[in-house]
Amino acid sequence: ETGVTQSPTHLIKTRGQQVTLRCSSQSGHNTVSWYQQALGQGPQFIFQYYREEENGRGNFPPRFSGLQFPNYSSELNVNALELDDSALYLCASSLGLAGFSYNEQFFGPGTRLTVL
Amino acid sequence: DQQVKQNSPSLSVQEGRISILNCDYTNSMFDYFLWYKKYPAEGPTFLISISSIKDKNEDGRFTVFLNKSAKHLSLHIVPSQPGDSAVYFCAASDNGGSQGNLIFGKGTKLSVKP
């Protein structure tokens, strides 16, 4: 069984650009959650997707959006990048809706985004 | 306003001794707590958890204690090993409630010296 993978590992963008980050969940996991981890902070919940639909969002603006595909892959899209978007972006997959104690989340290694 | 607080950014411990990492929370709706360990260039990995109906949970060298009245939990590692050197995150969940997912603290960087 393969773990959660993310691509790319690192990315540099300039302010105002758009970016797409990718995640491949563990096979059979129908939920993916995305987190933003700024320097010196803990991961902060962005949103989760369950069976290809958004199901819960944290305190992030609409320019953060996502997609989940039937093949256990997913994307995080960020439009109109700002300097404060520089962070490590983590995805985590789980068998069911995250946030419940019985659905353990498995994290990928993250994508380090730098916005100049 | 931080709902999960880890007030010690770093902790240094000698190999073989006990490591105690602390975490405080403010939201009384949290009823499930987790500790994650993170090595550089890797994602967080689940370490141990505790439900609010318990006050202690053990798994090998790792024990988590929960004091609900104080809204405080701690992770004890005994004995500490150099391989335990990592960043430890405390996280809380309200089990499908309004928070939507896990709420993490800022982390404590543990260094275990040989």
Image: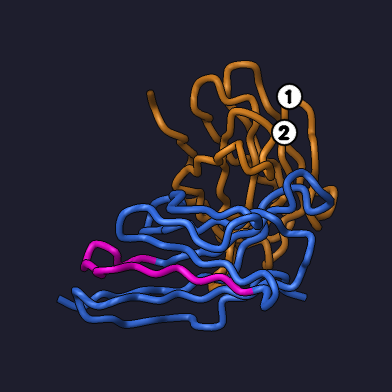
**Circle 1/circle 2 CB separation < 8 Å:** yes
Q: Quadrant of the C terminus of chain B?
A: bottom left
Find residue A52 and name its label: 1
Q: Which residues are magenta?
A: B72-86
Placement of B54 over or under B27, stated as above or below: above
Figure colour of chain A: orange
Q: A51 or B83: which is nearer to us?
A: B83
For mark 1, give the secondary structure.
loop
In the displayed structure, A1 sits above or below B18; it is above
Q: Position of residue B79 (x, y in %)?
A: 24, 69
Q: What subunit carries mark 1?
A: A
- Which label belongs to residue B20? none
Residue at 71%, 49% (x, y): give it.
B101
Q: Residue at x 61, y 71 (%)?
A: B67
Q: Name the image quarter holding residue A15.
A: bottom right
Q: Residues within 10 Å of mark 2 (few under 14, many from 20)?
A: many
- Would you say A63 lies left or right of A96 here? right
Residue under label 2:
A49
Give the amino acid at mark 1.
Glu
* Residue A116 shows in this picture: no
| Residue B87 horizontal/vertical position (percent) | 42, 67
Q: Nearer the viewer, residue B27 or A87?
A: B27
> Is A57 in the magenta?
no
Same chain, labels 1 and 2: yes
The tint chain B carries is blue
- Three-letter amino acid code of the residue under disc 2: Tyr
Q: Residues within 10 Å of mark 1 (few under 14, many from 20)?
A: some
